[in-house]
Amino acid sequence: MSRLTLTAAVLALGTLIPACGPGTAADAHTHAAEGEARLGEVQIEGRAGGLDAVLAMHGQPAPALSVTSWANGEAVTLADLQGKVVLLDFWGTWCPPCRKLTPLMIDLANRHEDDGLVVIGVHTSRGGATASAYADEHDIPYRVAVDGDDATVKAYQVNGYPDIYLIDRQGRVAYADVQQAPFENVERAVQKLLAQE
């Protein structure tokens, strides 16, 4: 299968991804009913009345990663990544939409690594012990951290899974709670940030 065909297939899959709430997979819902906004060409979400909090994060310094362990790869801080575009994917192995997002994230990370994109999967405390095996089983090339006490989840005001946050090259939150369906929305946000100096 050609890279273009694989990319098209992966992007098509991205149009079908709902979201898990902070509880169980049975809490899955779509975001549009609860609040969304547009920053330029990028659609963002705000669930459970959190749109104002999400909008307030834009342009602010990104909160530090306060994770308890790394499932794969070496530990890294956001300060270490200054000058790179960082995508934080808040997820859990227990969340079906998060698992559906995995091949999209792998493809995105592989295609844009040389352009300066760093993807970090931030696994919630719930089921964190399964993150390492999942990363190995799915050959996840990017770092996966376990947020054992959910300090990073709280700092970013994550209120559902998966949630995607993008940090610009200066270490500021550029896009909080980026809408993943369709996945082209995430692609658009990443490309905009990679094009900036």
Image (spheres, helix red, strand yellow):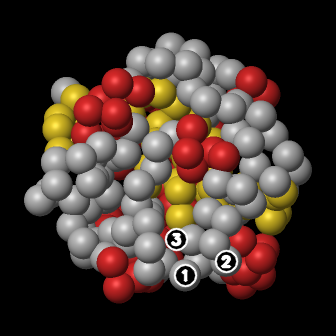
Residue 124 left/right relative to 91 = right
Between the residue at mark 1 and the residue at mark 3, the CA separation in whole angstroms equals 13 Å
Asked where in the image residue 40 lies, by quadrant, the reply is top left
The reply, left or right, for residue 188 in relation to residue 23 is left
Query: Which tag, 1 or 3, sits closer to the chain's start?
Result: 1
> Which dot, 2 or 3, sits closer to the camera?
2
Q: Is residue 190 left or right of residue 148?
A: left
Residue in view at x 47 percent, y 27 percent: 173
> Is residue 139 in view from this perspective?
no
Amino acid type at mark 3? Thr
Left or right: where 102 falls relative to 182: right
Is disc 3 placed on a helix, strand or loop? Answer: helix
Query: What residue sits right under mark 2 in the picture?
Result: 127
Tell me which label, 2 or 3, sits earlier in the chain.
Answer: 3
Outermost residue, left direction?
33
Task: Judge whether 102 appears above or below 150 on screen.
Answer: below
At horizontal 74% and vertical 42% (from top left) the residue drawn is: 66
Check disc 3: other Cα within 10 Å, few if <14, some if 14-19, many if 20+: some
Locate residue 186, reporting x and y percent. 35, 48
- Of labels 1 and 3, the one closer to you: 1
Residue 44, picture quadrant: top left
Within 10 Å of disc 1 (Cα), the crowding (few <14, some 14-19, many 20+) is some
Q: Which mark is residue 102?
A: 3
Cβ atoms at labels 1 and 2 below 8 Å apart: yes
Q: Amino acid at mark 1?
A: Trp
Q: From the image, tell me which residue sits under label 1.
A: 94
